[in-house]
């Protein structure tokens, strides 16, 4: 698209939803997404934006509310002059590190506290509550599933997070797309002007 100002990379993994996951797996994926891709202290942000400045942004998300399997998404916007291949290799390195090495206890506690705090603050918004309950109830979950979510997050162990990364974040389970500026279209439009 000639209107693209900032190129982007997006990788989606097919993962279980809260409805289809084995016990504890959905909560572990929630914690994993927060750990690797939420905020400036996340593993992806630190690796791609702070430590090796390859990207201007990096994040991850997990959509647990779905009737069927769902998506775990990773996105990054490369800095000018940095190739998508370099960014993908850095992402793969972060994921391999999580899958192979123990997660620091303080990182695990920090992200679990963040998730629970975000859920508590979100309850001040009636629209958010309606979306949570409506989404959960229409996908086969119960009111008790919603109410017990903070307890399930608190119970997640570092080993469960590592196991989720090993099992579900394999590259062969993913599809990657690139958003790039279409320079050929831009050149054709410039010739017409």
Image (tube, helix red, strand yellow):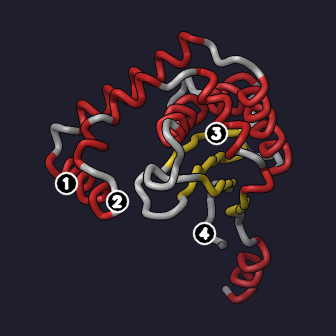
Sort mark 1 into few (<14), some (14-19) or many (20+) by Cα contacts within 10 Å: few
Residue indicated by mark 4? 3
- Circle nearer the viewer, 2 or 4: 2
Residue drawn at 76 percent across, 71 percent down: 183
Q: Is mark 4 on a helix, strand or loop?
A: loop
Residue drawn at 19 percent across, 54 percent down: 130
3D distance between C-alphas at marks 4 and 1:
36 Å
Q: Is residue 58 left or right of residue 112?
A: right
Residue indicated by mark 2? 140
3D distance between C-alphas at marks 2 and 1:
16 Å
Sooner in the amino-acid sequence: mark 2 or mark 1 = 1
The C terminus sits in image quarter: bottom right
- Circle nearer the viewer, 3 or 2: 2
3D distance between C-alphas at marks 3 and 2:
39 Å
Sooner in the amino-acid sequence: mark 3 or mark 1 = 3
70 or 11, nearer to the observer? 70
**Mark 2 touching mark 1, by CB under 8 A?**
no
Task: Say if 30 sits above or below 106 in the image.
Answer: below
Task: Say if 13 sits above or below 121 in the image.
Answer: below
Q: What element carries label 3?
A: strand
Residue indicated by mark 3? 56
3D distance between C-alphas at marks 3 and 1:
34 Å
Residue indicated by mark 1? 130
- Circle nearer the viewer, 3 or 1: 1
Q: In this view, does 5 lie to the left or right of 123?
A: right
Residue drawn at 78 percent across, 43 percent down: 87
Asked which quadrant contains residue 97, the reply is: top right
Q: Is residue 181 left or right of residue 72?
A: right
Sort mark 3 into few (<14), some (14-19) or many (20+) by Cα contacts within 10 Å: some
């Amino acid at each position: 698209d000639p209107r693209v100002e900032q190129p982007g990379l997006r990788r989606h993994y097919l993962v279980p939803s809260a409805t289809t996951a084995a016990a504890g797996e959905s909560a572990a994926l929630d914690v994993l997404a927060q750990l690797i891709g939420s905020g400036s202290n996340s593993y992806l942000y630190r690796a791609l934006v702070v430590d090796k400045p390859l990207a201007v942004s990096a994040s991850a998300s997990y959509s647990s509310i779905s009737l069927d399997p769902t998506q775990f998404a990773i996105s990054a916007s490369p800095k000018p002059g940095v190739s998508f291949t370099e960014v993908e290799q850095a992402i793969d390195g972060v994921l391999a590190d999580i899958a192979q090495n123990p997660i620091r206890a303080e990182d695990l506690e920090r992200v679990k506290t963040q998730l629970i705090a975000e859920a508590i603050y979100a309850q001040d918004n009636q629209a958010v509550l309606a979306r949570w309950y409506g989404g959960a109830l229409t996908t086969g979950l119960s009111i008790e599933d919603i109410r017990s979510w903070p307890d399930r997050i608190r119970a997640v162990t570092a080993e469960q997070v590592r196991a989720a990364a090993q099992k579900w974040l394999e590259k062969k389970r993913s599809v990657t797309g690139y958003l790039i500026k279409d320079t050929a279209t831009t050149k054709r439009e410039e010739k017409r002007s």
